[in-house]
């Protein structure tokens, strides 16, 4: 498909720089099976679901993955050659090693020393053409984790980080209440809307909750640079569905309940784990699933998700879920009515056309 079909104009002022307070006071645009729209709040979510439905949330936890410091390289008589550098780590490859993206990558060479904080030193093992780097730290294991947490910054998306620096508020704001498993460089943003009080109300309404894990990688920030969706390749991300979770979700559907995916990461995990018969199977591997219109969904009937970027893989996914023209109309209405977009913005509740 032509990537231009997924383009739309979004005014800068529609990009949210802070989340709603409280979280569940964010606006909710409900897109029904027939394409009709209802305007509500996230706190109204129990009213749109029914007893026996089950939420599926992503329990990944954002790490302080943005590291800033100095590159040092052996120099002449005046000492080492230094340059400022920024590393976004995104995949652990060993107790002391990570893959990441460097900026500016042109300043790095294999063997360079990196000083990324008072207690965080590393060595460049390799550098790719697109800015990818492999680095090994002087620390390892839990000691390295603690140093990264202390020295790193919350990896806010570029559309927020370009307007303000990360601060102490983001340490809490950019984590979901479900966050348990450290490993993401971006929050599963639909989950940011939940509060303990809302979860209690959902449970009281007979709506269960299951967890999956998908560690969100930097590909979520990268634009689609091709003109045809068939030529785009997703970055692989590690995902997990336990046998117990798979069994409960299959039982829920047999009993007549609907799977409500909280976020595109939960939905992509479920679809990666689903068999041709629609049954959810245990899953523990990397997934690079790319969902565009024409895809046959096998798991979730309902999707809670934020408003996404033009020409992004996430807008392609929601267009596959509810229909391209339906979503173009819904987004146009959201823009007209002042809904807030992206990670800290408002939400959509999509009911899939069956």
Image: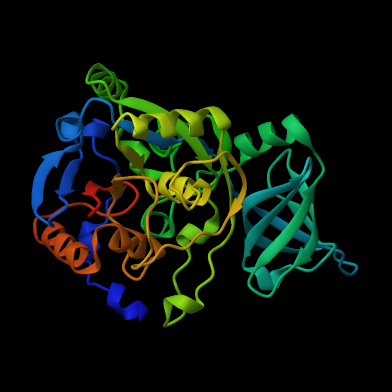
**How far across and how far down the image is residue 180, in percent?**
53, 29
Image vertical order of residue 196 relative to residue 188, above or below: above
Residue placed at 29% from the left, 41% from the top?
19
Residue 225 seen in render: no
Residue placed at 23% from the left, 20% from the top?
201
The quarter of the picture where residue 304 lies is top left
Left or right: residue 18 versus residue 275 is left
Residue 270 seen in render: yes
**How far across and how far down the image is residue 130, in percent?**
63, 72
**How far across and how far down the image is residue 310, in percent?**
31, 68
Image vertical order of residue 300 relative to residue 220, above or below: above
State which quarter of the image contains the N terminus: bottom left
**How far across and how far down the image is residue 308, in percent?**
31, 58
User: Which of the colour schemes (rainbow, by chain, secondary structure, one colour) is used?
Assistant: rainbow
Residue placed at 43% from the left, 59% from the top?
158
Observer-nearest of 345 and 241: 241
Left or right: residue 241 versus residue 313 is right
């Amino acid at each position: 498909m032509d990537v231009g079909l997924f383009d739309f104009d979004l005014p800068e002022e529609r990009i949210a720089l802070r989340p709603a307070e409280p979280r569940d006071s964010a606006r909710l645009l409900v897109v029904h099976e027939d394409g009709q729209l209802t305007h509500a709040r996230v706190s109204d979510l129990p009213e749109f679901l029914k007893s026996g439905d089950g939420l599926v949330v992503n329990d990944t936890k954002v790490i302080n993955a943005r590291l800033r410091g100095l590159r040092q390289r052996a120099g002449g008589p005046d000492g080492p050659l230094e340059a400022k550098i920024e590393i976004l780590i995104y995949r652990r490859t060993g107790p002391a090693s990570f893959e990441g993206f460097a900026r500016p990558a042109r300043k790095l060479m294999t063997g360079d020393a990196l000083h990324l904080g008072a207690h965080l030193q590393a060595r460049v093992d390799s550098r790719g053409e697109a800015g990818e780097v492999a680095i090994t730290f002087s620390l390892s294991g839990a000691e390295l984790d603690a140093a990264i947490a202390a020295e790193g910054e919350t990896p806010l998306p570029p559309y927020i980080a370009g307007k303000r620096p990360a601060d102490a508020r983001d340490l809490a704001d950019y984590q979901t209440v479900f966050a348990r498993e450290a490993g993401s460089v971006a929050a599963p943003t639909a989950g940011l809307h939940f509060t303990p009080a809302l979860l209690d109300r959902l449970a009281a309404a007979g709506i269960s909750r299951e967890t999956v894990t998908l560690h969100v990688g930097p590909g979520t920030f990268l634009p689609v640079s091709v003109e045809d969706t068939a030529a785009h390749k997703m970055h692989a991300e590690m995902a997990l569905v336990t046998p117990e979770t798979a069994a409960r979700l299959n039982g829920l559907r047999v009993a007549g309940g609907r799977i409500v995916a909280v976020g595109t990461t939960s939905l992509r995990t479920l679809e990666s784990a689903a068999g041709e018969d629609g049954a959810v199977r245990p899953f523990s591997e990397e997934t690079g699933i790319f969902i565009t219109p024409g895809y046959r969904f096998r798991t979730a009937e309902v999707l809670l998700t934020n408003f996404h970027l033009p020409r992004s893989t996430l807008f392609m996914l929601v267009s596959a879920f509810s229909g391209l023209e339906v979503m173009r109309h819904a987004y146009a209405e959201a823009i007209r009515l002042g809904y807030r977009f992206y990670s800290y913005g408002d939400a959509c509740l999509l009911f899939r056309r069956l």
